[in-house]
Amino acid sequence: MAGRLTDEVYSAADARLAEADARVAALYPGEPAGRQPVHTVYVPASAYTGDLVAQWGKRASEVFASHGEGLADDDVRAKVRGKLSAEPIEDLRIDFEDGYGNPGDDVEDEAALSAGRTLAESVVEGTAPPFFGIRFKSFEKPTRRRGIRTLDLFLAGLLEKHPLPQGFVVTLPKVTAVEQVEAAAQVLGKLESAYGLAEGSLRFEVQIETPQSILSPDGTVAVARIVQAAAGRCSGLHYGTYDYSAGLGIGAAYQSMEHPAADFAKAFMQVAAAGTGVRLSDGSTNRLPIGDRDAVLAAWGEHSRLVRRSLERGFYQGWDLHPHQLPSRFAATYTFFREGFPAAATRLKDYAEKTSGGVLDEPATAQALAAYLSRGLDCGALDDDEVAQRTGVDRTTLDGYARRLV
């Protein structure tokens, strides 16, 4: 049966929304392709060496061998042992900010240049993690020039003999005005020109660790404006547990990744980043698994619970500050994906085959199921063969579902 609207009505709607269509497409490109690390490890620049990844893996393996029998089931423990041996750190940030301090300009100049050279050598030798970069000092007035100079000198060392390596990203801390993000993006553009890099090749994560990075003075949502102020260079938003908590006046004993104030901030981060291609990371816990067996197990228990909590809330990355946190990071992450694997695989298989199962899933849910399985594969919790067998789809098709391409 013919409808009663003329083609002019359809054309008028298209014309009226053309600008909005283009804006939405530009601002919300969806989940980016490629792997997201499950953690970022922060180490002071003064402690960074070319064999740091191997050192951390050795220390983590030793404590896991001594105390890890109750941390997970046999299957997960075997996977954790392999991970600690082959790739103990997924993302490394060489810290020139809080973890480094202010040793003086001459010392920091030399440290920045040296760290850049060392990282370049480790990339060539194959001892660097898949993702890496530096955290420089903030763009607030007291530290702005120092932060820019450190980044400049670090790039000088990194690029002295080799091209910009894949997986490089920098971290902008302590944002107290959206304009600082705009300025950082402009500086990265100038650095690209100065070092002959491709436009847009330098990207940065923004740490959300001040009240001003959530709410602007005029009452608008600052974190959404931060994403746009980066002009396409923002790859992630990372929650800073302790700076943010202190900025709200929360006592040290109550500062935590699970404090209601933390959940409030992270909910804003999540909504602001949704669909933009900007990835999220939760923060850290400062309770370290060191000391006697009881102390290690208690700290692992808390860390595992917090990692699991973050994963359940859609934060698939966090910070680790000590080698002994690696076993609980990977054990909790692997357990999360392996426990949910059978149901997720069955639901995706039913969706792909249009089979009537116990749950009627829509395309958006199929996307979430596929993204969950892809993340499990990326981090090593799941294997390609078992996922293909349970879902009936290969990795290419799985990634297509995750990005709504099929």
Image (cartoon, rainbow, N blue to C red):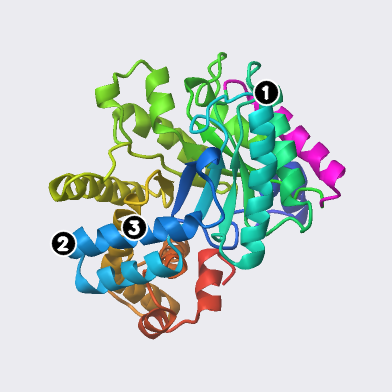
Q: In this rendering, does residue 62 appear at all? A: yes
Q: Position of residue 242 (x, y in %)?
A: 39, 28
Label 1 or label 3, whichever lies nearer to me, is: 3
Label 1, label 3: how far apart the Cα atoms are? 36 Å
- Magenta stretch bounds: 176-197
Q: Quadrant of residue 146?
A: top right
The foreground one among 285 and 229 is: 285
Q: Amino acid at mark 1?
A: Arg
Q: Amino acid at mark 3?
A: Ala
Residue visible at 46% across and 65% down in the picture: 87
Q: Amino acid at mark 2?
A: Gly
Name the side, left or right, on which 290 lies relative to 49: left
Dot 1 corresponds to which residue? 144
Q: Position of residue 288 (x, y in %)?
A: 29, 42
Q: Quadrant of residue 69?
A: bottom left
Element under label 2?
A: helix
Residue visible at 69% across and 58% down in the picture: 165
Dot 3 corresponds to which residue? 60
Element under label 1?
A: helix
Q: In this rendering, does residue 1 appear at all? A: no
Dot 2 corresponds to which residue? 70
Label 2, label 3: how far apart the Cα atoms are? 15 Å
The answer to whether the residue labelled 2 contacts the one labelled 3, judged by CB atoms less than 8 Å apart, is no
Residue furthest out toward the left: 294
Crowd around label 2: few <14 · some 14–19 · many ≥20 (10 Å): few
The foreground one among 112 and 282 is: 112
Q: Position of residue 319 (x, y in %)?
A: 42, 44
Image mark for residue 55: none
Residue visible at 38% across and 61% down in the picture: 58
Crowd around label 1: few <14 · some 14–19 · many ≥20 (10 Å): some
Label 2, label 1: how far apart the Cα atoms are? 47 Å
